[in-house]
Amino acid sequence: MDPNTIANTLSLILFAVSLFVSLRSFYLYMQSRTPRLLILGVSMFVIALTAAAGFAGDNITTISLNVDWFNYIGQTVSFLFILLSLYRSDDGYLRPLSFWHIAISLLLLILLLTAPILPDFPNPAITKSLLSGSRGVMCFIIFLAYMTSFMSKATRFSLLMTGAFLLISFGYLTIVPKYFQPSDVLDHAGDILRITGTLTLLVAVVVG
């Protein structure tokens, strides 16, 4: 089996699921005008783009594509804004937050467009472990926020979101050691956890 087969399959699944969650969130936003749904939609759309960029970076050999800058920073920013959107629920806070989220996400596209000329990360083991670890920490805090919500008001949506972000958090934290000692086992385990978490997020958005 091609060593990239698992990574490619997971990238395609992550792209499809993230894109569906994004489009579903946008659809629900158009009905309810809830800024939190807009932030979730933009975040998942950027994550879908990072999955597509990762797939391209792994398979296009005619040119050098350094998509890591976009992938790591794009995902970090996306989860940060999901986290910030849970801080308060009033529109006076969420609407400006959604504006800044869209503006910063558009700026992130510069990292994607300049992928052929971007240099590697300085001290990649440390840099990547910090960025990957920060994604895991933010997802874990999001997990705590939804768990608190579930404990105060037990809803199916908050339960599913609790499980989703716990799995995604563990997925990111699991792969941190591979940046110091490469391990396909950790890499695939982390990917599978993130895919499972993303699928749970999909269920939450569809039926929650």
Image (cartoon, grey):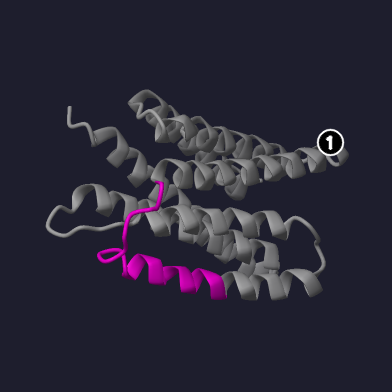
Q: Is residue 197 above or below residue 118?
A: above
Q: Secondary structure at mark 1?
A: helix
Image position, residue 200 (x, y; %): 56, 38
Image position, residue 90 (x, y; %): 82, 67
Image position, residue 79 (x, y; %): 59, 53
Image position, residue 201 (x, y; %): 57, 44
Residue at left 54%, top 64%? 42
| Left or right for 61, reference 204 | left
Q: Does residue 118 show up magenta in the picture?
A: yes
- Which one is nearer the viewer's eye here, 41 or 116? 116
- Which one is nearer the viewer's eye here, 1 or 183? 183
- Residue furthest left in the image: 62
Q: Residue at label 1?
A: 151
- Categorize mark 1 by other alpha carbons within 10 Å: few (<14), some (14-19), many (20+): few
- Which one is nearer the viewer's eye here, 205 or 165? 165
Q: Is residue 184 above or below residue 75?
A: above
* Magenta span of residues: 103-123
- Residue furthest top in the image: 185
Q: Quadrant of residue 178?
A: top left
Q: Amino acid at mark 1?
A: Met
- The quadrant of the rendering that contains the N terminus is top left
| Left or right for 93, reference 205 | right
Residue at left 71%, top 74%? 95
Residue at left 63%, top 56%? 80
